[in-house]
Amino acid sequence: MLAETVCSAVSAAGLGIAAITAYRKRFLTATRIAAYSLIPLGLVMTGVIEWVSDLVFKPSTWVGFGVLGLAWLLFMTTRAIERRGGGTRKERKQAAAAEQQAAVAPGASAPSLGAGQSAPPARQKKSDAPTEDFSDIEAILKKHGI
């Protein structure tokens, strides 16, 4: 009852300010003020204000919000633990197995070492690498007409 009365008074005051603004030949601003001042009146007429006041002043509503907050806190705590690597035992085993498979790449090491070699050669020709790099650069420059 009190909330409805306050909203109606706010609407009446807003419409009075809009009338004064329109009297000063600021019609666009007066229209905007009138629109804002009619919102509380519309909320009272639709029953939203009564619903909100019932929502705010009931203790069971606040207990419900507390339960929702606790659920959210538990959810976020479990996500934080999973991100730190805690997870479940099964997830940790799967992650360790995937990491070990990624570390051991039998197909990638054989071609780079060559047949029968256990380590890369100690020295490579220095003349081969720069010409390859410059040939790439020359091809790019020729492509652009330089």
Image (cartoon, rainbow, N blue to C red):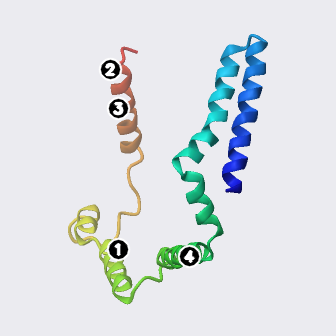
Whichever of callouts 1 and 4 sits on the residue coming sooner in the sequence is 4
Look at 52% across and 79% down and name the residue there: 74
Q: Amino acid at mark 4?
A: Leu
C-alpha span from label 3 to label 2: 12 Å
- Secondary structure at badge 1 equals helix
Q: Nearer the viewer, mark 2 or mark 4?
A: 4
Q: Amino acid at mark 2?
A: Lys
**91 or 97: nearer the viewer:** 91
Q: Is residue 56 left or right of residue 83?
A: right
Q: Which residue is mark 3?
A: 135
Whichever of callouts 3 and 4 sits on the residue coming sooner in the sequence is 4
Q: In the rendering, at what x and y percent does residue 42 appear?
A: 57, 40
C-alpha span from label 1 to label 2: 40 Å
Q: Which residue is mark 1?
A: 103
Look at 41% across and 39% down and name the residue there: 130
Disc 3 crowd rating (10 Å Cα; few below 14, some 14-19, many 20+) is few
- Secondary structure at badge 3 equals helix
Q: In the rendering, at what x and y percent does residue 115 appear?
A: 20, 67
User: What is the number of the mark on residue 73?
Assistant: 4
Q: Nearer the viewer, mark 3 or mark 1?
A: 1
User: What is the number of the mark on residue 127?
Assistant: none
C-alpha span from label 3 to label 4: 60 Å
Look at 55% across and 75% down and name the residue there: 64
User: What is the number of the mark on residue 143?
Assistant: 2
**99 or 31: nearer the viewer:** 31
For the residues bearing labels 3 and 2, Cβ distance under 8 angstroms: no
For the residues bearing labels 1 and 4, Cβ distance under 8 angstroms: no
Whichever of callouts 3 and 1 sits on the residue coming sooner in the sequence is 1
Disc 1 crowd rating (10 Å Cα; few below 14, some 14-19, many 20+) is few
Q: Nearer the viewer, mark 1 or mark 4?
A: 4
Q: In the rendering, at what x and y percent does residue 11 appear?
A: 69, 37
